[in-house]
């Protein structure tokens, strides 16, 4: 009679550990992505913190380096917008070459995917995958 109670206690401890692990991991990912999004919106590139740690920058140096990246951000955007038409052309050429090796059904599916991609002005990669492939669970 006492054995089953012990097993229930062990199972509850085990399941609570799994639950806390899942919740803690999700919270950590949320904090990490919130920080990355704020940095990107400010103009700080995703690799900045790793670079700063690798170089051993002091807090004062980090602040100055962040300010430099934030100041240069509009220029990066401007240059990217200038290059985008050429990049789009290369992408379209690549897709056309790819289509030559596909079956008619695969070509049709690729055409559908390309329509979805063209409809998005500035796609979020996760959102783009959901729109193209659906919610696969």
Image (spheres, rainbow, N blue to C red):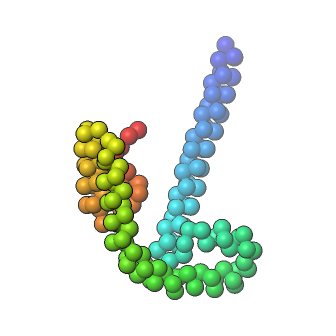
Inspect this view and state whether residue 130 appears. no
The quadrant of the rendering that contains the N terminus is: top right
**Residue 118, image x, y percentages:** 27, 60
The residue lying at 53 percent from left, 66 percent from top is 36
Task: Identify which residue, 21 or 33, lies in the foreground.
Answer: 33
Q: Is residue 35 left or right of residue 2?
A: left
The residue lying at 38 percent from left, 68 percent from top is 87
Q: Eyeballing the image, is 1 above or below 109? A: above
The quadrant of the rendering that contains the C terminus is: top left
Inspect this view and state whether residue 90 appears. yes
> In this view, which residue lies farthest toward the top?
1
Q: Eyeballing the image, is 38 above or below 62? A: above
Task: Identify which residue, 3 or 62, lies in the foreground.
Answer: 62
Tell me where residue 16 sits by quadrant. Answer: top right
**Residue 99, image x, y percentages:** 31, 48
Q: Eyeballing the image, is 14 above or below 55? A: above
How many numbered discs?
Answer: 0
Q: Is residue 60 left or right of residue 112?
A: right
The residue lying at 52 percent from left, 86 percent from top is 71
**Residue 127, image x, y percentages:** 37, 55
The residue lying at 54 percent from left, 72 percent from top is 45
């Amino acid at each position: 009679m006492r054995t089953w109670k012990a097993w229930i206690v062990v199972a509850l401890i085990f399941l609570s550990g799994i639950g806390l692990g899942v919740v803690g991991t999700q919270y950590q990912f949320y904090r990490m992505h919130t920080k990355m999004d704020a940095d990107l919106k400010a103009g700080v590139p995703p690799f900045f913190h790793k670079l700063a740690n690798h170089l051993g920058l002091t807090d004062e140096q980090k602040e100055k380096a962040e300010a430099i990246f934030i100041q240069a951000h509009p220029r990066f955007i401007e240059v990217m917008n200038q290059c985008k038409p050429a990049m789009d052309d290369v992408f379209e050429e690549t897709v056309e070459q790819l289509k030559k090796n596909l079956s008619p059904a695969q070509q049709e599916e690729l055409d559908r995917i390309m329509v979805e991609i063209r409809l998005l002005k500035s796609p979020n990669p996760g959102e783009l995958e959901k729109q193209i492939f659906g919610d696969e669970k």
